Image: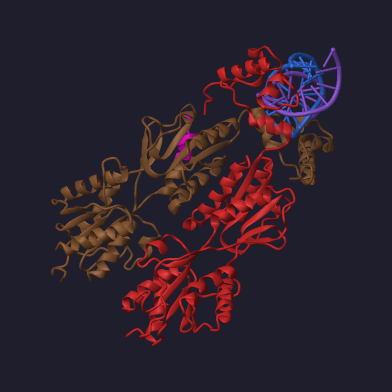
Chain colours: A red, B brown, C purple, D blue
Amino acid sequence: MSRPKPRAKLADIAARAGVSVTTASFVMSGRTDMRISTGTTERVLRAARELDYRPNLTARSLRTQDSRTIGLVADSIATGHHGGTMIQGSLHAAVRHGRRMLVVETAGEPEVEDALIADLVSWQVEGFVYATESHDEARVPPALREQPIVLLNCRDGAIPAVVPDEVAGGRTAALPLTEAGHRARIYVVGEAPDDVVPGRDRVRGITAALQEAGTTLDGHVECAWSPEAAYDALTALLAAGAQPAALICLNDRIALGVYQALAEADVGVPNDVSVVSFDDSDLARWLRPGITSVALPHFEMGALAVETLLDEDRRPGVQLVPMPLRERGSVAPPSRTRPAR
Amino acid sequence: MSRPKPRAKLADIAARAGVSVTTASFVMSGRTDMRISTGTTERVLRAARELDYRPNLTARSLRTQDSRTIGLVADSIATGHHGGTMIQGSLHAAVRHGRRMLVVETAGEPEVEDALIADLVSWQVEGFVYATESHDEARVPPALREQPIVLLNCRDGAIPAVVPDEVAGGRTAALPLTEAGHRARIYVVGEAPDDVVPGRDRVRGITAALQEAGTTLDGHVECAWSPEAAYDALTALLAAGAQPAALICLNDRIALGVYQALAEADVGVPNDVSVVSFDDSDLARWLRPGITSVALPHFEMGALAVETLLDEDRRPGVQLVPMPLRERGSVAPPSRTRPAR
DNA sequence: GTGAAAGCGCTAACAC
DNA sequence: GTGTTAGCGCTTTCAC
């Protein structure tokens, strides 16, 4: 890797402008407290322009002990493009605050993780954002615990964290249904074991909202969060004679499986059954009719995480980010006539 | 951002080990050409361990003029998670070669782009990978042209570039069809104007392969690459009385629209009509039946871009990466009986 | 075998 | 208003 042209340094432009490096430094960093004459300023600026001067940030960083760089450690940046969106949000906030970002992916391997973190620490990063693909309890690497850090989409005890407000999201999912008049034959689709945060909390929000509307869940279809599993489970449910009026799918992939089962059973959305789901992925837009879905605020979360990190007195707690509702055509008032089977 | 504990430096461990910084430096960097006695080595290592020494890479970088950092400039890292996968590949190759990566997103805004690039240059990055979300001709920013650079998923004249081999991909898409015995009523779905590389090249590959198999395309359904447009276009095609035996969709989103139209018209996949597509996104797996799809090798491309960049005498040309076929259940031999309509 | 010292490019006291 | 100078923490030549 041959460095094409040797960059001009401060000394070069100082020489060309006929001033000292100090003066050049002051002019280039735009400091006004040392008052440099307009003429000198002008000469320095011109010299810099002529020599295409770029400050060497490595040198500056070494001198000022300030790297203006933050480390983003992710367990996966590609799965389902949620990771991508979080990184995007972080990146934007970072440049807004004059920071660059060293990004690293651990693939969940602890040794790799430790090595990469050690490397970033050696690069004098100001602090870390530790992001996980799915919202969960995290096992934050010990090496990070002694660094300025904010968790993104996961939590670990008292470490500052930014996560989606899944409980409120659950309430939000129930809202279009109750507003459309649904009070009966409402089902949740997707398993929600106690140790899976999104499932558990979404269901909590849903049942709370339903209860306040004076009704309850009619059933909970426990199946894995995949189209296949949802298809099988819902097909079985319908075959067993259930006549759901509304289905709350715990994510869009489940909703896809549900749509497939519904189509096969000749049950129409939204006329025979209303469907809402979570994640607001592309799927929710593309299916026919589009699915009313509760979105994950990944971009905002990413941005908030770096802002929290950069905040001098950063709040120690968990920050819950609201999950907005995206309404589409999959919800209608309950049908008078039960779906014919 | 308060730096918790001041890090131990080389001088500290030298003092503790009772040696000079020179000796400490040699030991820590594991150089053998200066032969240090085993005892000394041992003492230095122990001191380093006790003080939890981490080399200051900023200082090292300044001294050695070698940042071991590469800049990844992307126009979008979140759309459709292709960007994410390319970055993932780049990241992996980077750490494999002992490099870290500064990642930056431009959102396509030239001023932002220039500023961010200038910043990375100032950080003394070794070189750049310039990645675009969709395979196309690129407008590489002038600031990058004078830097070591490799283009990822785009091309610009003679600048080294890594892109998918779309023409070969087109041939690959036709393969399962011709192998299943298809020779007639084969359609391409999705517009392919001359200035959209993937469309143009995929169609070229398809027609070439078909020609070699002794047949030709029966039609080309020109529609935008979205489920909605594809649905409308295919519905119109069927309404006009066409009886396709095989549909080659230029991407998975088109295939989704096609599936929807087919389902509505009661045309079965793969019995009445075979379908293949491009991109091998999640959709291709999730639809019923799963779609045989030609994948975009994003991970490999990302890795290859970094490797090309790091290659001392990097090849100047465009490197074409093969697009592998993922076979699923959407292809069958042509049906004897025409689909009933 | 080991150490002294120069210097990477920059900032910031401090002097004039 | 401007210049001198001492480092930031590291590598590396050269001397002993």
For residue B306: magenta?
yes
- Residues B211 and A111: in front is B211
Q: Quadrant of residue A5?
A: top right
Q: From this viewpoint, which residue is outermost toward the bottom?
A: A241
Q: Residue at x 33, y 68 (%)?
A: B288
Q: Quadrant of residue C13?
A: top right
**What segment is highlighted magenta in the picture?**
B305-312
For the stretch drawn in magenta, the main secondary structure is helix
Residue A249, given in percent of the width and then of the height, sits at 47, 72
The N terminus of chain B - image quarter: top right
Residue B150, can we see it? yes
Describe residue A295's horizontal placement relative to residue B251 as left or right. right
Q: Is residue B224 above or below residue A22?
A: below
Q: How many numbered dots are placed on residues in this image?
A: 0
- Residues A258 and B99: in front is A258
Residue B31, can we see it? no
The C terminus of chain B - image quarter: bottom left
Residue A244, given in percent of the width and then of the height, sits at 42, 82
Q: Quadrant of residue A206?
A: bottom right
Q: Is residue A106 above or below residue A334?
A: above
- Residues A85 and B307: in front is A85
For residue A9: magenta?
no
Residue A269, given in percent of the width and then of the height, sits at 36, 74
Residue A190, given in percent of the width and then of the height, sits at 49, 74
